[in-house]
DNA sequence: GAGCCATACCTAAAAGCTTTAGGATAAAGC
DNA sequence: GCTTTATCCTAAAGCTTTTAGGTATGGCTC
């Protein structure tokens, strides 16, 4: 019986793809084993349990979004940078709903510290470098951007904006929100 | 053998309390049956399945928060109204993490329409009545407030703000965010 | 190339959650 | 007091998770 070549990495990737297709909650070890045509217990050599799988998907998604954000932020600043960073989250949440949902799971302290989370915080601080904010206001602004982007993606994903039928559209509101955030943060600038 | 007096309502309330204690994911029918000292299949007369339980908890939580919001908004306007509505969500998310998590679950279209969701939308519109916005901007603002409040509550719950050890504190940022939202929406006012 | 070792993957099995089927009895209505 | 309703039960099957222990594959040493 030939070996399939399972690794933690391949299992994680398969779990992420499966989550995007069928939803994060439907990613069972049974379903995962089926994609590799392998018996369920075989997975236990590579992941600890289903919670571990979800954590690994979260870490993968945080890495991917951090890479996307780093690319998107190259050479832009101010409102353009806010739009670029927000756009990364918004389009990622749409294209990879399962992976995105995983990024919303709480991670324990040391896992979070070893994740791409700190890199995200640094990238968000980079967005704000175009504004003249002191340290405290920079922190406030990092939190405001995080909250707004994630809140928006979550409401969008939940269909709260009407699945394209609402007036005005989600896209229109999105532009308005970006304008608003730009103005808001500019209003905090030291005079 | 005396009857316990199960009803959909009592099961839902027990599920909500259990969710606040042990987390929404840990609300299994088995655990729920244990709280009533009843056999698991007995629950099936009152709820359809575990997903139905979560939906019912979500509907309960939406009702509760709508009631709280209606109270909190009585007689206030402008920045005070934004603070009141945001405060309702923030404190509810802290005091009832399981119920709050349930409000974040996607509901199907007709369930959402029959929920307290529309009442929430109306309450948020009431907050904005203190500002002079046209219809489109009111809709944008409703979405902005929803996104910001829910994003903030989610990040707060996930410990992204450092569990009281961070500088500046979550409370300080919260006030700053309220100021910012007030300014932002005021900047949209028709001149 | 032969033999050895690590480990990838397996079968067996138990435990927990969900779900259906069908039955007994408590409570409500007349 | 009897009938009816539906509440709650036991029995049982199916699925997911998890542990224990075995087999054989593929790489490594010589």
Image (tube, coloured by chain):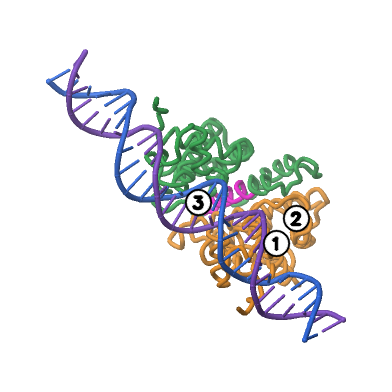
Chain colours: A green, B orange, C purple, D blue
Give the residue pinned by disc 1: B59
Q: Main secondary structure of the magenta part?
A: helix
**Between marks 2 and 3, how big is the CA–CA gap?**
46 Å
Q: Where is residue B182 in the image (x, y as percent from the top left)?
A: 68, 58
Which picture quadrant has residue B37? bottom right
Mark 2 Cα shell of 10 Å, populated few (<14), some (14-19), many (≥20): few
| Number of numbered markers | 3
Q: Nearer the viewer, residue A143 or B188?
A: A143
Query: Which residue shows up at 73% across the image and 42% down it?
Result: A170
Query: Which residue shows up at 71% across the image and 66% down it?
Result: B63
Query: Which residue shows up at 70% across the image and 52% down it?
Result: B107
Q: Do labels 1 and 3 share a chain?
A: no
Mark 3 Cα shell of 10 Å, populated few (<14), some (14-19), many (≥20): few
Q: Describe residue B154's horizontal placement relative to residue B182 as left or right.
A: left
Name the front one of labels 2 and 3. 2
Q: Describe residue B153's horizontal placement relative to residue A13 as left or right.
A: right
Give the residue pinned by disc 3: A134
Earlier-in-chain disc, 1 versus 2: 1
- Whether pointer 1 and pointer 2 mark residues with C-beta atoms closer than 8 Å, the reply is yes
Give the residue pinned by disc 2: B111
Q: Position of residue B76 (x, y in %)?
A: 74, 69
Q: Over which residues does the magenta segment extend?
A: A137-151
């Amino acid at each position: 019986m030939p070996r399939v070549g399972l690794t933690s990495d391949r299992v994680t990737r398969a779990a992420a793809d499966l989550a995007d297709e069928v939803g994060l909650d439907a990613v069972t070890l049974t379903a995962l084993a089926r994609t590799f045509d392998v018996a369920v217990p075989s997975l236990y050599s590579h992941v600890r349990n289903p919670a571990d799988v979800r954590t690994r998907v979260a870490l993968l998604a945080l890495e991917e979004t951090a890479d996307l954000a780093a690319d998107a932020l190259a050479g832009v600043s101010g409102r353009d940078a806010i739009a670029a960073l927000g756009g990364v989250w918004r389009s990622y949440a749409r294209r990879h709903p399962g992976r995105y949902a995983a990024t919303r799971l709480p991670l324990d302290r040391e896992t979070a510290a070893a994740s791409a989370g700190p890199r995200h915080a640094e990238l968000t601080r980079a967005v704000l470098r175009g504004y003249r904010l002191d340290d405290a206001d920079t922190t406030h602004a990092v939190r405001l951007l995080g909250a707004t982007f994630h809140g928006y993606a979550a409401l969008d994903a939940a269909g709260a904006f009407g699945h394209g039928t609402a007036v005005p559209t989600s896209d229109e509101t999105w532009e308005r929100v970006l304008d608003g955030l730009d103005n808001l943060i500019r209003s905090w600038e030291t005079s």
